[in-house]
Amino acid sequence: MVTELWMLVLGTSGLSLLTLLIQKRLVDLDLVRSIKADIKKLEKEIKETKSEEKKLSKLSKQIDLQKKMLGLTMKPMMLSSLPVLLAVVFLSSAFEALVVTLPVALPFIGAQIGWFGVFIMVSVLSTLVFRKFLGLDFY
């Protein structure tokens, strides 16, 4: 069981790294950071503006920038969804009998989780770590 758990952890971490490398390769990080800075600037201006007409104009610009940023980050996500889907299908068949007993019971989940719970926990944690190391912390 311990070997299976480590295989699942390493496979999930590798999958997280792969998706982040795809994202790093396909996203123009400088443009996304610039758009995010512009959005923050517009938010500040909207709060300070008294005129409703000017607020609506700035809000419209902000929404356009958010759409542009979403478009830039959505394409790599769509591309990396295929490997993730294939990996989930493989992992479900390879680790369906895996049950991990946690040291502390989680609310609404309990003290035991299956392969999918481990997959979610490891992917979230490894993505946070890899995102920081790869410089993808633009969100």
Image (cartoon, rainbow, N blue to C red):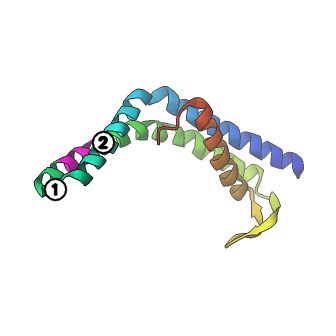
Q: Which mark is residue 112?
A: none
Q: Is residue 28 visible?
A: no
Q: Point out the frontmost of discs 2 and 1.
A: 1
Q: Which mark is residue 41?
A: 2
The disc, 2 or 1, on the residue closer to the chain's N-terminal end is 2
Of residues 92 and 110, the one nearer the viewer is 110
Total tally of numbered discs in the picture:
2
Magenta segment's dominant SS is helix
Q: CA distance from mark 2 to mark 1?
A: 16 Å
Start-end of magenta stretch: 58-66
- Left or right: where 137 falls relative to 46: right
Task: Give the residue pinned by disc 1.
Answer: 50
Q: Residue at x 81, y 60 (%)?
A: 100
Q: Is residue 64 magenta?
A: yes
Q: Is residue 10 magenta?
A: no
Helix, strand, or loop for circle 1?
A: loop
- Left or right: where 138 falls relative to 41: right
- x then y, percent, for residue 55: 18, 53
The residue under label 2 is which amino acid type?
Lys
- x then y, percent, for residue 8: 76, 46
